[in-house]
Amino acid sequence: MNLEYAVDKLYDAGWSPLGSTDLDRLPDGRTFPSAIAVQREFARAGLELSIKHNLMFHCYRATWAPAGEPLDPAHAADERHGTVVGSCEREASVYALAQLRAHQAEQWTVGAGSVTHAADDRVVAAR
């Protein structure tokens, strides 16, 4: 994986730079949130994001969980927990946000499960 792939996944998950501040830019001109901006977005969602450098494997691990809950990289991924790895802090943080947003998009419901949907946020069927 690389930063460009992480940014692709973030855009695929519906992220837009409109109204965002603290943006970085890829050489191709696409913008993406800085690692600090990603931290703030996780905090607004009530989650804590930890990004740690793994010297042995020359990578960065981003792990998230509800604020106040211990961070456990081995916890099964769900809408409130996850772990991703990247080659740099920016890549790990952007990919973490992409994963969070994609999982949240898959989980939304209207009412008591009366709407089904596709991962790209299109309503597919309503009962």
Image: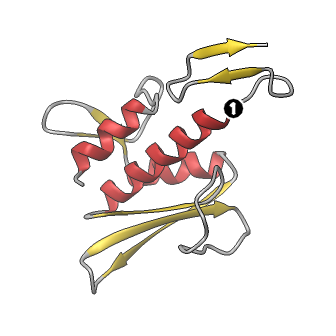
Image location (x, y in percent) of residue 6: 32, 46
Q: Quadrant of residue 116?
A: top right
- The reply, left or right, for residue 35 in relation to residue 66 is left
Kindly state the secondary structure of the residue where label 1 is placed. loop
Residue farthest right in this picture:
112
Question: Is the residue 77 above or below the residue 103 in the image?
Answer: below
Query: Where is residue 29, by image quadrant?
Result: top left
Residue at the location (53% across, 40% down)? 101
| Observer-nearest of 21 and 117 | 117
Give the quarter of the figure containing the C terminus.
top right
105 versus 92 height, above or below: above
Q: How many marks?
A: 1
* Horizontal side, residue 31 vs residue 22: left or right: left
Is residue 88 rendered to the left or right of residue 11?
Answer: left
Percent x, y for residue 77? 58, 59
Residue 14 x, y percent position in the rendering = 46, 28
Residue designated by label 1? 108
User: At label 1, which amino acid type do we have?
Assistant: Trp
Q: Quadrant of residue 59?
A: bottom left
Q: Residue 37's spot in the image, x, y percent?
A: 46, 47
Q: Residue at x 31, y 40 (%)?
A: 7
| 94, above or below 105, in the image | below
The answer to whether 51 appears left or right of 100 in the picture is: left
Query: Residue at coordinates 80% horizontally, 27% vertically from top-left?
Result: 113
Q: Quadrant of the N terminus?
A: bottom left
Residue furthest to the left: 27
